[in-house]
Image: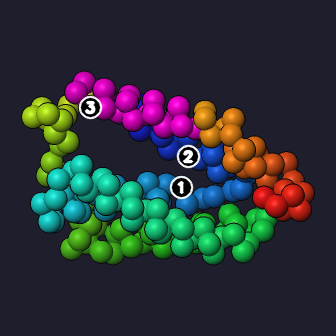
Amino acid sequence: FFFLNLLLIAGLNLVMGWTGQTSLAHASFYGLGAYASGVLNVRYGISPWIGTVAAIVLVAAVAAFVGAAALRLRGPYVAMGTLGFSGIITVMFVELEPITGGPNGLSAIEPYTFFGTDLDNAMRFYWLAWLVAGMVMWCLLNLYESAQGRALRAIEGSEIGANTLGV
């Protein structure tokens, strides 16, 4: 759970810490990815690995759509817009009971299998989570030192100033 939360915090730090933009939809994107992967596995029998990749693509597409709308907002309205999206997603998870399981959630999700070994307990899953979290943190460290990272941090200093410089 530490490494899963580390991934969530890293993404939140990228948005709120580096750019200073207040997003209240972070947990909704996490839940959307989890439900997408779980539904593909439980309802359609798709491998957890393929379901994870499909969930990443779905969440990226939804995030691009929400982000395009949120980019038109300024100040506290960004927070309100992302909060509205979060509310919609939360209601959707509960109301689509035939698909999502409603308030009870999904059960019987298959574990990841890595070279014939089921990652079905915390000790086996630990190494995969450690590897993924390590790769994400390495990518973020490289992004932080890059021109794109400096551009993101410039937005936090002054959004108008960064805009005048072409960011």
Q: Residues within 10 Å of mark 1 (few under 14, many from 20)?
A: some
CA separation in Å, label 1 and label 3: 23 Å
Q: Residue shown at 45%/33% (left/top)?
A: 135
CA separation in Å, label 2 and label 3: 21 Å
- Residue 11: numbered disc: 2
For the view shown, which residue lies furthest in the left direction? 116
The reply to whether residue 18 is visible in this rendering is no
Q: Quadrant of residue 56?
A: bottom left
Above or below — where is 83 with respect to 128? below
- Residue 125: numbered disc: 3
Q: First in sequence, mark 1 or 2: give its number.
A: 2
Magenta part of the chain: 123-140
Q: Residue shown at 69%/35% (left/top)?
A: 145
Q: Main secondary structure of the magenta part?
A: helix
Taking depth in this image into account, of 60 and 145 the one nearest to the observer is 145
The residue identified by callout 1 is 26
Amino acid under disc 1: His
